[in-house]
Image (cartoon, helix red, strand yellow):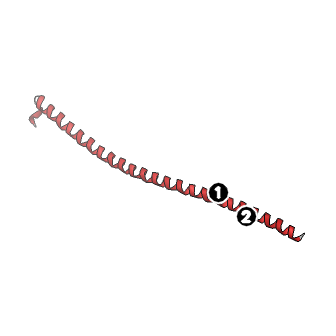
Amino acid sequence: FSLARSRRMMAEQVARMSDAANLINQQDRLLKDTADEHMDVGGTVGRAGKQITKLKSNAVYDAILMAGSTFAFLCVATYIIWARVPGFGLF
């Protein structure tokens, strides 16, 4: 009676430990998958940050070009008015 009960208890413990080991393996896989996704997101965020910096520098460059082209246009328009309108070039 005692030997049968001991075997049954040991079989129950082995089954519990097997279930626990399976659960730990599942959790390990889930944690590794989460870590991989985190690394992928980190790389994406880094690339996005670089692109935002590049876009900001391009916006500054575009603003400088716009100011320069507006200045050039105003200079040409002023010259045309100065050259074509009689009496405007007296100053």
When asked about the image quadrant of residue 24, the answer is: bottom right
The residue sitting at 88% across, 71% down in the picture is 2
Q: Earlier in the sequence, mark 1 or mark 2?
A: 2
Question: Viewed as shown, does residue 26 lie left or right of 4?
Answer: left
Callout 1: SS: helix
- Expressed as whole percent of the image width and height from the top left, the position of residue 1 reads 90, 69
Task: Give, as a three-letter code, the residue at label 2.
Answer: Met
Q: Residues within 10 Å of mark 2 (few under 14, many from 20)?
A: few
Q: Which residue is tagged 1? A: 26
- Expressed as whole percent of the image width and height from the top left, the position of residue 74 reads 20, 37
The residue sitting at 32% across, 46% down in the picture is 58
Depth check: give the residue in front, 51 or 25.
Answer: 25
Marks 1/2: CA–CA distance: 14 Å
Q: Residues within 10 Å of mark 1 (few under 14, many from 20)?
A: few
Work out which quarter of the rendered image holds the C terminus and state it: top left
When asked about the image quadrant of residue 17, the answer is: bottom right
- Expressed as whole percent of the image width and height from the top left, the position of residue 70 reads 24, 39
Question: Viewed as shown, does residue 8 lie left or right of 61?
Answer: right
Which mark, by number, is residue 17?
2
Task: Give, as a three-letter code, the residue at label 1.
Answer: Gln
